[in-house]
Image (cartoon, grey):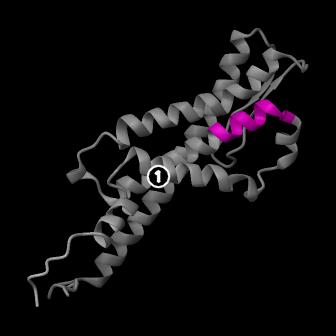
Amino acid sequence: MRRFHTRVPVNFNMAASVAVTTLLVLLSIVLIWLIKWGDCNLHESGHYVVGRLLGIPIADIDWCGPRSLKGEVIPKISENSVRFSLFYFSGGLISGAGLLAINLFIFANVNKETRSLIWLFFGLLITIIATTELFLGLFEGIDHVAYQQSGGKPALWAIPIIVGIALHGLTIRNTTWGRYFKYLFRKRNTSEP
């Protein structure tokens, strides 16, 4: 049976390796925050644009800032009608569809040879954020009062995260899970001793 060994080069510099790893982790955290910040503002702009198109007067807009990833578009009047249901559906559905389009055209449309695990991780992250946004749009549009009272409980996000992981696996065949199963079920060379 063949084993994989990692050989450390003779001139290996541990301090430089730790510095590069720390820099990559910090860069990843900043990129994750930027993706979520852009998604939050896309969600609120979806509410705003659809509200303006439907003739709903807007009282106030709270954009997502650098300290808080919560925003809100507040209409001047509120009523139970199709217009307001569309207004509440629009934020999550527009941002979720936009992020899925980004994922399909940028992250899924790359040669298999050029994909790295970091590339796959950011594709997975964007897919999970997109599915949670689609879920938010549906939940917010169907029952806005329950959406406001939920307060972002973690139990609500289990289903969209699972759907996001599955969707990521469907859109990108060469995912980490795909590589793992390919390794598990590979054809073994029977001529080796």
Specify the quadrant that holds the N terminus.
bottom left
Judged by its main secondary structure, the magenta piece is helix
Q: Is residue 111 magenta?
A: no
The residue under label 1 is 124
Q: Find residue 10 and report its image quarter.
A: bottom left
Residue 58 visible in this rendered orientation of the protein = no
Point out residue 73 in the picture as x, y percentages from the top left corner: 76, 28
Q: Find residue 192 and report its image quarter.
A: bottom left
Q: Image point 30% across, 57% down: which residue?
A: 116
Q: Is residue 171 left or right of residue 80?
A: left
Relative to 118, is 15 above or below?
Answer: below
Relative to 119, is 190 above or below?
Answer: below
> Could you tell me how many numbered marks the image carries?
1
Q: Secondary structure at mark 1?
A: helix
Q: Start and end of the magenta stretch? A: 134-144
Q: Residues within 10 Å of mark 1 (few under 14, many from 20)?
A: many
Relative to 162, is 4 above or below?
Answer: below
Q: Image point 73% across, 58% down: which residue?
A: 154
Look at label 1 and name its amino acid: Leu
In front here: 192 or 9? Answer: 192
Relative to 181, is 37 above or below?
Answer: above
Residue 47 visible in this rendered orientation of the protein = yes
Q: Is residue 168 left or right of residue 62?
A: left
Q: Is residue 156 left or right of residue 21?
A: right
Point out residue 13 in the picture as x, y percentages from the top left corner: 24, 83
Point out residue 172 in the picture as x, y percentages from the top left corner: 37, 48
Specify the quadrant that holds the C terminus.
bottom left
Q: Image point 8% across, 82% down: which residue?
A: 191
Point out residue 156 in the picture as x, y percentages from the top left corner: 74, 52
Q: Is residue 143 magenta?
A: yes
